[in-house]
Image (cartoon, grey):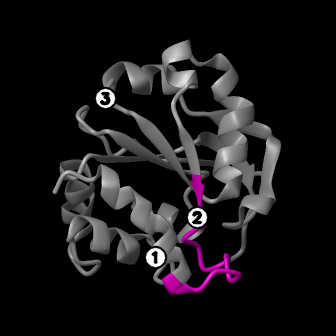
Amino acid sequence: MVFDKTRIVHCFSPIAGGKERVLILGSMPGEASLVAGQYYAHPRNQFWHIMSVITGADPAFPYEQRAAALSSCGIALWDVIESCRRNGSLDTEIDESSLKPNDFRKFFAKNRNIERIFFNGGPAERYYRKHVLPSLPPKYAKLPLVCLPSTSPANASWTKEEKKKAWQVLATYCRR
C-alpha cells in the first residue's frame, strides 16, 4: 500500500452510550482500522483479545457485538485525535502541526459518568495532556489518567501476556 503524506485521516465516532464509567483512548486508528471502519482491526493488535478477558466477548465475534460488550461493561472507547496528517499507521508519523483533537467537552456532556481515563499507549496520553486537558472544565480535568501499554504489534517491548496482565486493571471498573 502506498501512503499519501498529504492525506488527512479522521477517527471514528466513540463507542459510548452515556452510562460508561471508564474511557479508553487511543491516538488515531491505524490504516487497517481505517480501511475496515473498526477500532483495532489490525489482526495482530491485541486490543480485542485483551478485552475478551474483561468483557467476555470473543475476539471472533462480529465487531458490533464486541463494541456492545464494551459498553455493557461500562467501557467507552475513542481516540484523542479527530484528524491529522499521517503517513502510514505509526503514531511517530503523525504530523503534530496538523493534529486536531476530538471535542471532549461535547463528549463529556453526553457521557457524564466517566470516572477514569485509560490510554492505549504513551502517545495517546501525551496528545491528550497537550491538546485536550488544558481546555477541559475542572471536573473532567481532574479525572484520574492511567497509561497502559499499547496493544499495537509495534509495541514489541511488551509480550502479549505482559500486556494482558497490565490491562487487567480495567476489570475493576467493569460491570459484568
Comes first in the chain, label 2 or label 1: 2
Amino acid type for the residue under numbered disc 3: Asn
Q: Please name the residue shown 55% across and 33% down the image.
A: 102
> Which disc is residue 164 wearing?
1
Which quadrant of the structure image shows residue 149?
A: bottom right
Q: Can the viewer see residue 36 in this picture?
A: no
Extreme residue in the top direction: 137
Q: Position of residue 52 (x, y in %)?
A: 29, 73
Q: Nearer the viewer, residue 35 or 166?
A: 166
Q: Please name the residue shown 63% across and 60% down the image.
A: 121
How far apart are labels 3 and 1 at the CA level?
Answer: 25 Å
Q: Which residues are magenta?
A: 147-161
Horizontal side of 112 relative to 44 (left or right) equals left
Q: Please name the residue shown 57% across and 41% down the image.
A: 145
Amino acid type for the residue under numbered disc 2: Gly
Comes first in the chain, label 3 or label 1: 3
